[in-house]
Image (cartoon, grey):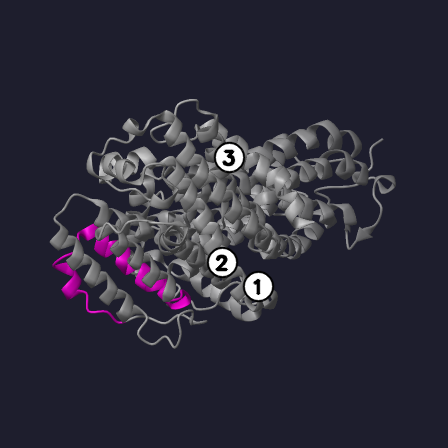
Amino acid sequence: MLTYLDIHLSYTLPIIGILILITRPFINRLEIFKIGCISATAVLYAIPFYNYYVYNGAKTYSPESVLAVIGNVPVEEYILVIFQTVLTSLWASIFVQWSTPCLNFNYDKHSYQLIRWLPISLLSVATAAGYTMAVPESEKFYLGCILCWASPAIILMWYGAGNFFVKKIIPSSIAIAGPTLYMCWINRTTVKEDFDLGESALEEVLFFFVTNLMVVLAGSSYDKAYGIIVTYSLDFPHQFSVSLRFIRQMIRAFVTSEYSTPSDVTQDIKTSLKVLSTSNAFGTSNYLFHAGIRLDLIILYAFCRVTDEMFDNRTDEKKKKLKLELSKQFISEVFADRKSDYDVKKTPQEVKIDWRKYESEFTDVELSSYRAVSRIAFFLPRKPFEELFAGYQWDLEFTLVRDENDLMLYTTYVAGSIGALCLYVIIYRYGNDINDLVDKVDYLTKHAYKIGQGLQLVNIARDLVTDSESLGRCYFPAAFMDDEKEDLRMLCQEKNPRALGNKKLKKYSSKMIQLANKKQFESVGAIKCLPQDLIGSVLAATELYRGLINLIQSCPIYPTRASLPNLNKLLIILNTLYIKSIQYIF
């Protein structure tokens, strides 16, 4: 006969182990804290309920099948509460964590109130009905206990996160269904053989469904609260920490109704996502980071894309130069109070900007991106933004890349700067309470620039033909060319890069790849200094470019604009997250 402990060892623990292996690259300290809080709360909330229905005979246990009893309940039953919570939380994380939290906010007050109060009203009725049924020794005693125990908790969570849950109803339903079916199967095949269960099969299913609903809804409550915090950082200044201060802020964010917050913040983020919808590199790597970092990267990458198109499109040069000057004014306004190039604020600080002078020249999409950046600028340094616009000025003036020094300067401007900004996102969202990360900021910044340079060199290697045909530009150093005058004429004036011949294009591309490899070799070691749960995500983003290098080199004819198939991207990401990243962790 199986003991209760045997059931845990044979059925619940192995599945938890498998889920841990699957979710390992995506389980960060926020997820660990969330699962810990939900597990602890679940045990505390279950104690009176379990003891009450066992005391009144709704469920009995064979003494030889349990290790010990606390109150009226076997200790294994409390362990099951923890195991089920962990199992369901890990399973849910596979399905529910991929969307940006603010996209699940409901800003329509009428529908918000309807979705909030209608289920609460029905649950209140269920609570009252359960109370009337929970009469010891009655036929519906166990069902009544479930209703009057679970409904108040669901009401509380639904009040704050019901709308958020409904927006993610499909992945949330899968998150509930999987563990429910599995728990019912375990109960049917093992527990019924060894224990005298005084409830019907329907009540068993209801119990597992309700408890898994409570776990998934609790996870949604946490995700909604944290989503409010990272979306409205100016109003919720405390970043994640295991502290009462952060917990109090989470509770305040949880009870905040989304419709009472300014929707233009989320609208600007949606615009940023729309801008990035055609970006293959970002679309693949974005989801590897947790919600806070992901949201800031969306804003930053969209800003880079918008500004890049602003100065690359075919509008007249006078208009481009005017927008460049306005952009420089914008940077000056945003960072007016900074004492040095890399001075940042540790607490949120709203920037006062007169948007009227920008509204007359910038498009709605451009304004949206600039507003979004202004909201997160307090934890970002000024220097990388100045460098980024110096790179745009380089392009507007068609400055020739004469040698390797020019090349390194240009890649520092347009890509190294972005690498540095990404680092400061990580430091703010993750590192304010990690002294080691903050102490190494100078070292990490230096190497973040190199990582950005390396990725840009791969872009140059890939875009020799595209840059020439579409823009009449060449970023390959003139000093490296076989015939500088003729090659530049073909690339920049004639816009006929294929006239150089396949052999020469492959040669020039290989030179850029050689420099990119050097930058990666110099910088990749710094990834080890990042928090362990971020190493895989950062490494995967760089490895996608390694895959692009392999693709370019493997093509016998230089491709016009090489791109990795989705399957190749997936294989690279999986290999990096589950295998290659391990050497950087241990």
Which residue: 72% across, 49% down?
Answer: 78
- Residue 286: name its quadrant: top left
Q: Nearer the viewer, mark 3 or mark 1?
A: 1
* Residue 404 percent across, percent down from the top left: 41, 50
Contact, CB < 8 Å: mark 1 with mark 2? yes
Position of residue 229 in the picture relative to residue 148 (left or right): left
Does dot 2 land on a helix, a strand or a loop?
A: helix
Distance from label 3 to label 1 (Cα)? 37 Å
For the residue pair 481 and 77, the one nearer the viewer reads as 481
Which residue: 66% across, 54% down?
Answer: 43
Which amino acid lies under the numbered mark 1 shown in the image of this protein? Answer: Leu
What are the residue bounds of the magenta stretch? Answer: 352-381
Q: Is residue 471 magenta?
A: no
For the residue pair 452 and 228, the one nearer the viewer reads as 452
Where does label 2 land, which residue? 426
Does dot 1 land on a helix, a strand or a loop?
A: helix
Does dot 3 land on a helix, a strand or a loop?
A: helix
Distance from label 1 to label 2 (Cα)? 10 Å
Pointer 2 or 3: first along the chain: 3
Dominant SS type (magenta): helix
